[in-house]
C-alpha cells in the first residue's frame, strides 16, 4: 500500500448536529456504480446518534463526490452546530459543501 493510501482505507467519519435533521438524503452509491453496502449510512445525524457509514471500507473514489444531504424543516433559536469525528488521527473526510435556508412564502 502506498503511504498516501494509508489513511483513506482507515477513516470512519461521523456527523452530528445540535438539532436532529428532519431527514437525511443519503448518497446514492448505486447511481455512481459503487457497492451500496460499503456506502450505506445509519444514525439520525444528532450528537447522540451521529450519521455514519455502515460499511467497514468506503473507499475514496476519484471523480466521485460522496454527498449526503441533511434537511432541517425548522431551526429553533438562532444557532445550529456541526460536530464530526474520526476514529483515527490524521485526515478528516467531512466537508461542508453548502448551506441553504429557505423561508416559506405566504
Image: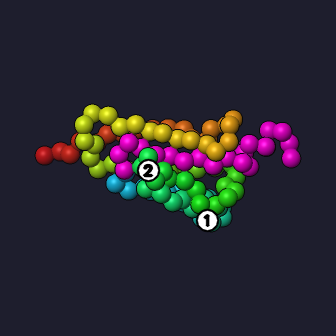
> Is residue 22 one of those drawn in magenta?
no
Q: Is residue 63 above or below residue 41?
A: above
Helix, strand or loop status at disc 2? loop
In this picture, which residue range is highlighted in magenta? 1-20
Helix, strand or loop status at disc 1? helix
What x and y, as percent, mark residue 47? 44, 46
Task: For residue 69, say whether it is visible.
Answer: no
What x and y, as percent, mark residue 67? 53, 49
Q: Earlier in the sequence, mark 2 or mark 1?
A: 1
The label on residue 36 is: 1
Mark 1 crowdedness (10 Å alpha carbons): few <14, some 14-19, many ≥20: some
Pick the residue in front: 15 or 59: 15
Quarter of image, res 94 = top right
Residue ID for mark 2: 48
In the image, is 34 to the left or to the right of 71? right
What x and y, as percent, mark residue 18? 38, 42
Pick the residue in front: 60 or 1: 1
Amino acid at each position: 500500500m502506498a503511504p498516501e493510501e494509508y489513511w483513506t482505507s482507515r477513516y470512519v467519519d461521523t456527523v452530528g448536529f445540535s438539532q436532529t435533521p428532519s431527514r437525511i438524503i443519503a448518497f446514492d452509491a448505486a447511481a455512481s456504480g459503487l457497492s451500496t453496502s460499503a456506502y450505506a449510512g445509519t444514525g439520525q445525524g444528532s450528537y447522540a446518534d451521529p450519521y455514519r457509514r455502515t460499511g467497514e471500507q468506503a473507499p475514496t473514489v476519484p471523480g466521485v463526490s460522496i454527498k449526503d444531504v441533511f434537511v432541517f424543516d425548522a431551526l429553533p433559536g438562532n444557532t445550529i452546530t456541526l460536530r464530526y469525528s474520526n476514529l483515527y488521527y490524521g485526515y478528516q473526510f467531512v466537508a461542508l459543501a453548502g448551506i441553504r435556508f429557505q423561508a416559506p412564502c405566504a
